[in-house]
Image: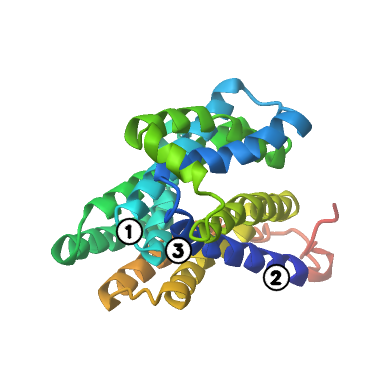
Amino acid sequence: MSLRDRLLAVLVAVLWGLNFPATEIALRHFPPMLLGALRWALLAIPAVLFVPRPKVKLRWLIGIGVGIGLVQFAFLYLGMAAGMPSGLASLVLQCSAPFTVLLAAAVFKERLHRRQVIGIGIAVLGLAAIAVYRSQVAALLPVVLTLAGGLGWAIGNVCSRGAKAPNPLHLTLWMAVVPPVPMFALSLIMDGPDRIAGAFSTLTSGAAWESVLGLLYIVIVAALVGYGIWNTLLSRNPSSSVAPFSMLVPIVGVLSSWAAFGEHIPVAELVAGAAVIGGVLYASRPVRVLLSVPTLQEPVAGAAPVDPGLVPTSREP
């Protein structure tokens, strides 16, 4: 990757990391399901009006929308609304990486290399440590809900792998068409019409403007700008070079949550989170393929010796 692309990848990680405290601020005014519905509706409207539908099978498009758009953000927002700190949420959500590898192995029969198995094992142990620690000192439910969100992200990743969209940005925008209606329906059931009406009727109040700004950041900066740059980087660089930069997201998420809210994450959870990130990084490293180099045969008795200068050391294309 060029220096410019590496700096852009770091910028995306910063934008996505700041998405977690922005979400926590938005949830102060909007109920979880309503926030998710608004997030995707604000993306779906311009997508339908101005962006051509991606040339992929409908089942993959629906799968991405359900996995990433509905399941991931429904459970993530519910977890954060139930008390999951934004910084810790950015760490636990990295469970999507080992989930993605395991699902891809099951669906597409992709072979798991030893390095991937070891890395996934380390990441899973780190997540288990976080769950055990939280069960002893705080509520476990927010962690479980966030893990379910990571599983939804993994499902969407596998569907995206199966879609093989010629234009990933169009696919990213059109997946926003799937979640709004189910999320509005869930909001009606879980939040009730009165709470929804109250959220809309008080949008102009002074207490709501921070949450509105948080919602706009989620939609415009984190989604449109972040995914736009990310997909551009993936289009001109190997995914193995781009993907590891996403491991910077929880670092930014933890630091920004600490700066914004004074959020403190215990040392035990930080160590376990580092194990999750380290395991994912180790599993994502490219596998080296060792090629056997043929050796020169021993000279046949009575044959003329071979001049070393005539032995080709490279082959022209």
Name above or below for residue 67 compared with residue 133. Answer: above
The kind of residue tagged 2 is Leu
> Which colour assignment does the render follow?
rainbow
Which quarter of the figure is the N terminus placed in? bottom right
Q: Which label sits on residue 102?
A: none
Give left or right: position of 292 versus 117.
right
Mark positioned earlier in the residue sequence (1 or 3): 1
Distance of label 1 from label 2 (alpha carbons): 30 Å
Which residue is drawn at the image coordinates 60% and 30% (left, top)? 177
Left or right for 154, reference 148: right
**Disc 3 from disc 2: Cα separation:** 22 Å
Q: Is residue 129 left or right of residue 152?
A: left
Instruction: Pinpoint residue 4: horizontal percent, then vertical percent.
Output: 77, 69
The alpha-carbon separation of the residues under discs 1 and 3 comes to 27 Å
Q: Which residue is mark 1?
A: 84
Which residue is located at x 70 percent, y 70 percent? 7
CB contact under 8 Å: marks 1 and 3: no
Q: Is residue 175 above or below residue 227?
A: above
Residue neighbourhood size for the residue with mark 2, other residues' Cα within 10 Å, grouped as few (<14), some (14–19), many (≥20): few
Q: Tell me if residue 183 can be seen.
A: yes
Q: Amino acid at mark 3?
A: Tyr
Which amino acid type is marked by label 1? Met
Residue 147 image position (x, y, % from top left): 33, 49
Which residue is rendered at x = 37% and y = 58% of the image? 92
Instruction: Look at mark 3 in the image and give the residue it sits on.
Output: 282
Mark found first going from the N terminus, 3 or 2: 2
What element does badge 3 sit on? helix
Frontmost residue, 11 versus 37: 37
| Residue carrying label 2 | 7
Q: Nearer the viewer, mark 1 or mark 2?
A: 1
Between marks 1 and 3 in the image, the one whose residue lies nearer the viewer: 1
